Structures are given as structure tokens and as C-alpha cells.
Amino acid sequence: MGRMLRGFSIVSIAVVLAAAMAFTGCSNNSPLAPDPEFLTKPIVNGVLSTVAVVEKVISAEDGGLILISRDAYQHSFAVQPNAILADARISVKSTKEKVNGVTAIVFEFGPDGLVFSQAANLNFQMSELNSRAVSAKLYYYDPSAGGWVLQANRSVVSGHVNFDIYHFSKYAISD
């Protein structure tokens, strides 16, 4: 009887451990769980489009670089040293959308309203939209106007275009 009780105890412990492991996997709050928005693929113009979300703490003293990967394209956002007053967790979400009737890549930066004393730089790989483009436009979304406002028009150099960003808002790049 002692051997049977010991066998039952070992099996019971194994079942409890297996159940505990099953219920402690990745949750939506787990740092290892995938961001559900990142996995979303909206359809734009009949084509699946990746929603890219990236987040990084940027040092006020040192500045920093955030790499934004969308499908096979690489964009970047650079903050200059001493351009922000305090260290900040910066997030960037990018999607492909229609803006003023044309296809654009939209960037939503956070935290909302962050202001830079020196321009941050958004470097965009233009081939994501049009590999033959010679210029690109930067728009920002103005909620009070209820629409997109042209902020800048820049030349494409070696397949990339650079835009100065002085504060966080919702921005769009088109050709």
C-alpha cells in the first residue's frame, strides 16, 4: 500500500506541475507575449500591410536611434543628445494607409506631445512606396482641421529621404 500511495503522490505532483505550467504561459501582459497590433495585417489597396510597432527608451543626455522595420524595409528615427528634457520611452507605430487620396506610410509617435529642442530625424527608405520617386512629402494630422496638412517636401537621395521632426504627432510620408 505504501508503494501505491507513493506512486499516486508522484503522479499527483506531476499533474499539478503540468497544470501550473499551462496556466503560467504568455499572457497579454507578459513581456514575452507578441504585441497583437504588430501581428495585425490590414489590407490596403488589396495588399496585406504590416503594422510595425517599436518602443525604446531614449536617453536625454545621449540621444539615441530607433530602427523601424516594416516588411523588408528599414527606416530610422534619431534623437540628438540633449534634445529632450528627460529620458523618454518612445514608441513608433507605422502602417500603410491612404492619405489625401494616395498611398502613404503613416507614423504615430509617442508619448503624445513630446517636443524636441533640436530636430529629431526621420529617415525613410523610399522604395517602400516608390523606388523611382525623386521627392517625398511629409504630412502631419491636424485634429482641429480634421485632416492632413503638408509640412515638408524633400528630395530623395540614394533611395532615402530625411525629415526633421520637432514634436510628436501623427505623420505621413507619400511620393
Image: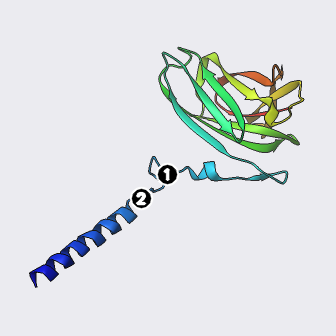
**On screen, 137 above or below 23?**
above
* Count of numbered badges drawn on the protein: 2
Residue at 85% in and 51% down? 45
Residue at 84% in and 27% down? 136
User: In the rendering, which numbered label is found on residue 78?
Assistant: none
Q: Residue 155's quadrant in the figure?
A: top right
The residue where tag 2 is placed is 25
- Between the residue at mark 1 and the residue at mark 2, the CA separation in whole angstroms equals 9 Å
Question: Quadrant of the image for the C terminus?
Answer: top right
Q: Position of residue 126 (x, y in %)?
A: 80, 30
Q: Residue furthest left?
A: 2
Q: Badge 1: few (under 14), some or many (20 or more) residues near its Cα, within 10 Å?
A: few
The residue where tag 1 is placed is 33
Q: Is residue 48 left or right of residue 4?
A: right
Residue at 62% in and 22% down? 78
Q: Is residue 162 left or right of residue 68?
A: right
Q: What type is the residue that disc 2 sits on?
A: Gly
Q: Position of residue 125 (x, y in %)?
A: 76, 29
Q: Is residue 143 visible?
A: no
| Local secondary structure at mark 2 | loop
Q: What type is the residue that disc 1 sits on?
A: Ala
